Every structure is written in C-alpha cells, then in structure tokens.
Amino acid sequence: MTSTPALPAATILGYPRIGPNRELKKAEESYWAGRSDLAALEETGRTLRAATRARLAELGLAGEGAIPESFSWYDQVLDAAVTVGALPSRFADLQGEDGSISLASTFVLARGDEQRPPLEMTKWFDTNYHYLVPEIGPDTAFDLAGDQLVRWVREAAAAGDSVRPVIVGPLTLLLLAKAADDAPEGFDPITRLADLVPVYVELLAALRAAGAAWVQIDEPALSADQRLTPAELSELVAQSTAVLAAAADRPAILVTTGYGHPEGVLPALLASGVEALHLDLVKGQLPAVEDLAGAGATQLVAGVINGRNIWRAELGTAAARVAELASRLEQAGGTGGVVVGTSTSLQHVPHDVTLETKLPAELRETLAFADQKVTEVVELASGSVAAGSVDGPLSVARTFAGVQVPAVRERAAAVTAADTERAAFSVRAAAQQEALGLPELPTTTIGSFPQVGEVRKARAAHRKGQIDDAAYTQAMKDEIARVIALQEELGLDVLVHGEPERNDMVQYFAENLEGFATTEHGWVQSYGSRCTRPSILFGDVHRAAPITVDWATYAQSLTQRPVKGMLTGPVTILAWSFVRDDQPLGDTAAQVGLALRDEVNDLEAAGIGIVQVDEPALRELLPLRTRDHDAYLDWSVASFRLATSGVAEATQIHTHLCYSEFNVVVDAIDALNADVTSIESARSRGEIVEALDPEAFPRGIGPGVWDIHSPRVPSVEEIAEQLTRARAAVGAERLWVNPDCGLKTRGYAETEASLKNLVEATLQVRAAA
Ligand code: GLN
Ligand code: ZN
C-alpha cells in the first residue's frame, strides 16, 4: 500500500440514502412501474450522491477519507452480494456474458419476478431495517461482478470530491447469509471464506485504481454473532481482515463493528494490520487497556454519536468517552490516536430536523437527525467541548410540558405483581368457553383487511381537511360494515373490524396517546424503497380518551358473532418509534402498558369479549447477546401483562407475533400468558406448533396457515393437511385457525378466495375428528 494520510478527526459511518424528500423512493417506484426509464433513475442516484457529498462537506466533514460513499439502490448486503457475484442458482442467468450484474438484475434479486421468488428479507441486527439474505452454497462462484462502488468513487473524483467507499465485509456477508436451497444439509456459508476473500482483494485494488485513499469495510456481525466463539471469530478475522490488510495494492482500510461490541475479537482486529478500527461506544463499551495492547499505529474511530436515535447527544459525556478511549489507547502503547464518529451508519435516522417546522420548538431543539449528528461529530472533533461538561442540550431542554407527568409516574410506581396476574388458565378457559361458545378449531384473522383505494383516499382527504370528521367516520363505518358482512358470509367464527382507520399499527396509537410527537419528513428506510416515519416518544405516556372503542363497538353492533378488539402492544410501539433515552426502556414500556390497560378494560366494559394485543416486534428488540435476554424479557413481558391483566376471567386475550425464529422466544410466548397466541408461520411450514410443548404451553395457539406475502391462494387440501398436522401436535382444544398477518397489503380477490378455503378446510378437519 502506498502511504495515505491518517483518517481526519471527524467522520460518520454512513448517511441516509433515500433523500430528504424520499427522492430515491419516488424515482425507483416510478421506474419499477414503467413510468420512467433506467437513465432517469441513474440520474436521480447521481444527483443524490452529489448532494450528499456536498452536504457532508458543508456540515464540516473535511479531509481525505472523511466522507463515506454509502449510497445503495436497495440494500447494502445485496450490494455486497452482487459485487462479489454471489447469486443463487435460480438467478444464475442474471450475470451477463462479461460477468457483470446490472442494476436491473439487482432489482430482480431484490424483488423477484414471475418465475422466481426474491432473496429473503430479514432484520438487520436489532434494528427495523431489513436486508436481503444472501444464499450461498458450496458451488457459489465468487467473482468481481458488480462495479458500482468503483464507479461511484470515479464519479466523485470526476466532480473533484474524494470519498471513502463503504462495503459490507466478507465475514458479515457470510455470517448473515443462509445456505442455498441446493446446498447439502448442514452447510454453513462461512466455510466459503477463503474463496470469497480474494474477490475483496481484487475489489480493493480496483478501488485504489479509481483513486480511493480509504475504504470502509463493515463487519458488524463481529459484534453480534452468537454461533461462533470469540476465538473462532478471531481466527476468521485472521483469514479475512488480515488477508485484506496484507494485500499489496489497496486503499487504507477502516473496519467498522457497529451495533455492539466485538467482544474477544478486538485483539485479532487490532492485529490484522488495518489502518483504522471503529468501535460502537453507544451500544458497545470502552475496551479495556489490555484489549488495546496490540493497537500499534491503528487509528480508532470512537462511535460516540448514536446512529440509531434522534436525540441530541450530551456532548460533554461524549467528549469524556472520546478522551477516555484516547487515554486507554495511549496507556496500551497505541500511537494512532482517536477519531470521532457515529456508532453506526446514520441510515437509521431521518435527514434533517430543521424541516420539522410543525414540531413544538422546545422538542425540536432536543432532536438531532442525520445532519445535526454530523454537526455533533464535527463539534466534538474540533475539541471545543470540554470532556464531562454538563451544558449538553439534553439536560437543559428536556424539561418541557409532557416529559414528566406526575400522575403517570405515581401510577407506574404503584404497580404491584398482582397487576400482572390473572386467574389460572384453566379457570379462564372455562369462563371464556361459557361466554363465547366457540366451536372447536375456531377460525379468525389477524386484524387488518385489504386497504382498498377508497379507504386510503378517505384517510388522506381527512388528514388534509378535505372531508370533515363526520364524513370520515361514515366512510370508515361503511368499510367496517362491509368487512363484517364479508366475514359473516365467509363463515369465520371470530370477526375483526378490519383496521381501516389505521395507516400504521404503531403510528395510529402514537397519534392517539399523550407523550408522542409525529414528524412530517422523518422518514427512514425500512427496506428497498419502503420507508417508515417513526413517531417520537418523548414524554410520559398516557391515554387521554378511549381510542378504539367506538370502532370496535360499532363492528360488534353489526353481528352476533364475537368481534375481537385490536391493539398494538407496548413492546411493538417502542420498537417502531424513536424512544426517549432519559429513563430505562422498561419504565417507558410500563407506561405504555398502563395506557393500553385502560383501553383493554374499556373495550371489555363496552362489551368486547376478545381483545388482541399485537406484539410482532417482541423478537426484534431481543438483545444481540444471550446474557441480556432475561432482563429484556422481564420488562417486555411485564408491560404486555400490565396491559392485558386487568380484565375478567371470561375476557379472552389474544396476542399475535410475527417472525420465523420463534424458537428464541418460545419461553416468552408462554410468559405473556395470553389465552390465544397467533403466530406468523406459513413460511416455516407451521413448525411452531411442534416447538410448543403442550405440557408447558397449555393455551390456545394459531399458527398461520396462509403465507400472505404471496398472492397465491392455498388450496383446501393444503390447509386441511396443515391443520391435521397441527392438531396432532397440539390437540384440538388448543388449535386456532388463522392466516398469517398482513391482509392489509393483499387484494380482496385472493383474500376472499383464501379465507373461503380456510373455512372449508376447517370444516373438513372438524368433521374428520
Ligand atoms: N393486526 C395487525 C394486522 O393484521 C398485525 C400486523 C402485524 O403482525 N405486523 O395487520
Ligand atoms: Zn404478524
């Protein structure tokens, strides 16, 4: 390697890619719909990349290597897979004759086509961002197939800018990959490391040739992997990171480890010979002096500015952490010094809080979106903030109305164990059977029904003030009446109102609870072109008035069959919002639990005999390290139970969870103590029922029998077969029949056809008992 200047004093790991006005989303969706061509899309990308470079420079990131090139058309893991040619065999034809994979082909991998399902999608560490899961087999042929990163370096250079290209590293790529469908049983993608690393070596040379002085290699899996021991991971670092560092022709390398701490692997990383190493000092921890012993001349990037929340940092505290890391590095004999950075990429936060002109000023002043966080990094790096000084904005500003509500605090403090207990399940089950009189294998759905154009239009018109409250309420009631009539006609046993009034299952509650604020432009990428606008939970949460009771009672007034009330649970509300960080999450969850308890109790009082409290995000917030699981499950389960334990024995509490790795939370499902749990499971072929030991878990269970992610209508036979199998595993008294969640995103044609088959299959299986 030719000698390069050190990394400048301030940098960030990555920047939002969607554009301040979601330009990327709009351009992509227009291209996918055939309304614009590839050239127009490419132009949008170029403009966004140039604007990002200009913005970051304007905010003060200066010097060679300071500005990351972290753009992605869809997902950074997909980008890495494409770059190294890691295509599953069903997509082999996407690689052109010259070995390259085009942008159009990249979108096919991400979105599938008529014949082929796309790559699977799953959550990126403990965030709400989803990446595409590479599929790797023994025969996956790695080669340098994607050159976009190299082109972007040249593009910047041509504009007179220098960037630090960012790519997901070989370890993380393989550790996050799954075995290809055609791989032999038990195959582990990480066994292909030696074949993959040479392609990265080639890439580094190409980046260097394009003029990159620095490259950023993201290896967050080192902070999160639970399968391999630190010793095994260290060995893998020696076989990959160290090999890259030994390459003759390459830019200087920064390895990042955000989302946690690379416990036990740090010495190997420092010994690898890379020029700079990033540590997440928000989720991770300050390393001990001994662990820094091998640092030599390696520069450390102190990830002290939180890339995942939207609060302004306590700069004095952050400065103290930077100083402490620098001092430990020095004590360990390290000479590289410390650079200030973010804990992760800023892709998890919106662009710019100054666009939020409608937020109360006192709240806005406490917020930092991506641009403000860059400013914080620059300010810290300038040395103008005294370590440990307490003039941080947080302590000054978060004292406005709503942050502390004494009545809410007193109520939370008065909670006792009895508030989270209900009568024994056997007692409840008898009372519920008596009250509800449901048949064996009761049929139901998970809550939402397809959100047709008129519903969306009415919601939008109401928001813009084009229709008044009365007209809006009537439109929603009409939709509820339609959905109730449909469910009766289909012959479902437990009905739902269909959730037409909800744009989003969390935002709806955030808008109707005290303690939350919503933004106008606070979009963050969820996956691909999909963005969400998380609400901001800034204050003590409580409920000013009933939220869902009118809708539910209206629905119930239309039918003799039970209508299930529908709420979003405390953990999910937290997981999909930006949450205050000035008190433990568990305290905040308890407040949300109490607010929901009021709603559950009011639903019961209004004659709703079944209430479902959805917790699809229970798995998502699960800490990355196993040793932290118990503490998390304690408060998360407690908040759910607070919400749901205030009802009579005869009131049936349902919950719904959605993810495939249910085995991690089987105990939690039990601890939630819901009378009925429905679980998204069609994609894992109903295995959940076999994981739930009937002895240990005596309560109702509804494994989804229809995968809603696809418009395919399952046949009666297929559903009947699943039900027969599930009944054999769990017993007829426990089994509920329902599709997976997400009917909202489907059309009516397949919804009606599938639910018809679901009811028919249930009748057959009941008759065959
Ligand atoms: N009740 C919600 C629905 O049916 C649940 C969504 C979810 O599980 N993510 O849409
Ligand atoms: Zn779900």
Image: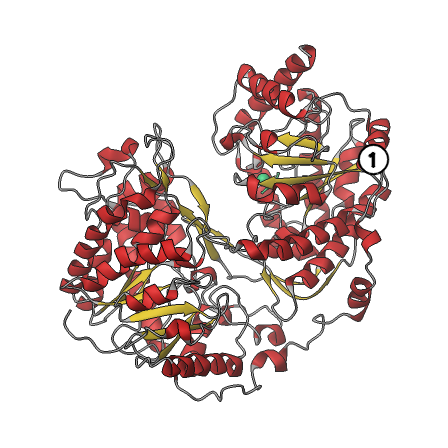
Q: How is the image coloured?
A: secondary structure
Residue drawn at the location 35% of the way across and 43% of the way down: 134
On the question of residue 147 being in view, the answer is no
Looking at the figure, which quarter contains the N terminus?
Answer: bottom left
On the question of residue 598 being in view, the answer is yes
In terms of secondary structure, where does tag 1 sit? helix
Return the residue nearer the eye: 268 or 343. Answer: 268
Q: Position of residue 321 (x, y in %)?
A: 48, 79
Residue furthest top in the image: 768
Q: Is residue 608 left or right of residue 86?
A: right
**In this view, 57 is above or below 645:** below
Q: Amino acid at mark 1?
A: Arg
Q: Position of residue 230 (x, y in %)?
A: 41, 57
Return the residue nearer the eye: 365 or 590. Answer: 590
Q: Position of residue 121 (x, y in %)?
A: 43, 43
Residue drawn at the location 33% of the way across and 64% of the way down: 268
**Neighbour tally class for label 1: few under 14, some 14-19, many 20 plus, Cα within 10 Å:** some
Q: Position of residue 713 (x, y in %)?
A: 51, 23
Quarter of image, res 730: top right
Quarter of image, res 691: top right
Return the residue nearer the eye: 597 or 173. Answer: 173
**In this view, 82 is above or below 310:** above
Ligand 1: image quarter: top right
Return the residue nearer the eye: 301 or 297. Answer: 297
Residue drawn at the location 48% of the way across and 28% of the way down: 711
Quarter of image, res 361: bottom right
Residue carrying label 1: 428
Q: Is mark 1 within 8 Å of ligand 1?
A: no
Q: Is residue 412 left or right of residue 214?
A: right
